[in-house]
Amino acid sequence: MSNILKKYLTPDHSTRMQALHLESAWQTGLAHQNLPPLVVQLLGELAAAAVLLAGNIKFDGSVVLQLQGNGPVRLIMVECTAALQLRATAQLREDAIVPESASLQALLNADQQGRFTVMLDPSHRENGATPYQGIVSLEGDRVSDALEHYMKHSEQLDTRLWLAADNKQCAGLMLQRMPIPSSPQTTPATTDAANATWAHCQTLAETLRPGELLADSPDTLMHKLFWEDDLLAFDDQEVSWHCPCTRARVADMLRNLGQAEVQSILEEQGQVHIDCNFCGKPYDFDAVDCASLFLDDPAQTPAPGSGTIH
């Protein structure tokens, strides 16, 4: 099953395009997350957007997109690295009722205080350095509306997105208008031509029918839309699901709790059960597993990096 990001460029290099289609990687990500269908759709659309943006970053790090508000859905967050490793999660409020059909605003922005956050987080930050973070109000009824609003007002970059997702696959198409360089060779005719290309690409992309994004591979989709245009196509890029939670990291966290606390949980529940608070993957430790945690560490010194699993 395909997990492909594909990049394209118009002949005049004034508009770049990216098409994405995820199947097995997306199914892996949902395997341990029990979410209502509408939340799965929103999470998948945000995941597709994150991959499309991560495909353009020029540093070793991650793109993090976050939708947060006071509706039935408290948080939707996605992270994608420059190596196109993806993880995504959504958190609902306790006893939240998610209707079968509702807008982004109804689910996350009931009090009009919702926020859309974009973070660029380098893998190797200097001490005290903080990642770049842009925050705007949560606008529009779809994930694509929210991100287009952010790109227009925070990055001053014309961007159009078409996103789709269900519990089997997620997909997206992104158009971005490239800045016109200031040089003696740049003429009004150059600008007019770039404007015409941008309008042409949007007009064709607007003909996308519901379901086409999910049904077609990137190359098939782009051929359907731009079959008359001699697009420059780049090599496929593979996208994978990756959450850094491991059994060893969970074990470190339990050691950090201490033997007495772990024993108390074991006596009450018969085992220690931990779900990753990002991807939901379960980890179970029985009495023998718990005893072995402290055999080689009588002082119960926490391992480096121990703590909450995320």
Image (cartoon, grey):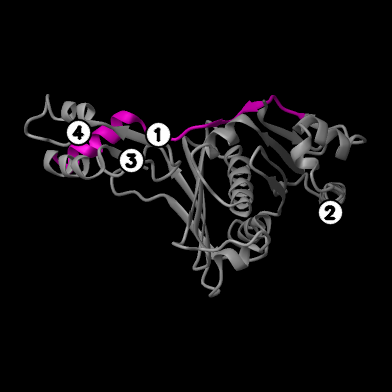
Q: Is mark 2 on a helix, strand or loop?
A: helix
Give yes or no for contact between labels 1 and 3 (Cβ–Cβ under 8 Å).
Answer: no
User: Which residue is denoted by mark 2 in the rendering?
Assistant: 188
Q: What element carries label 3?
A: strand
User: Which residue is denoted by mark 4 in the rendering?
Assistant: 303
> What amino acid type is highlighted by mark number 4?
Ala
Give yes or no for contact between labels 4 and 1 (Cβ–Cβ under 8 Å).
Answer: no
> What amino acid type is highlighted by mark number 3?
Ile
Instruction: Mark 4 or mark 1: name the one nearer the start of the chain.
Output: 1
User: Which residue is denoted by mark 3 in the rendering?
Assistant: 274
Mark 3, residues whose alpha carbon is within 10 Å: few (<14), some, or many (≥20)? some
For marks 1 and 3, give the one nearer the viewer: 3
For marks 4 and 2, give the one nearer the viewer: 4
How many numbered marks appear? 4
In reply to whether residue 61 is colored magenta, the answer given is: no
Give the Cα separation between the discs numbered 2 and 3. Answer: 62 Å
Instruction: Tell me where the magenta segment starts and ends, as one range.
Output: 233-258
> What amino acid type is highlighted by mark number 2?
Pro
Q: What element carries label 1?
A: loop
Where does residue 33 sit, x and y in percent of width and height?
50, 43
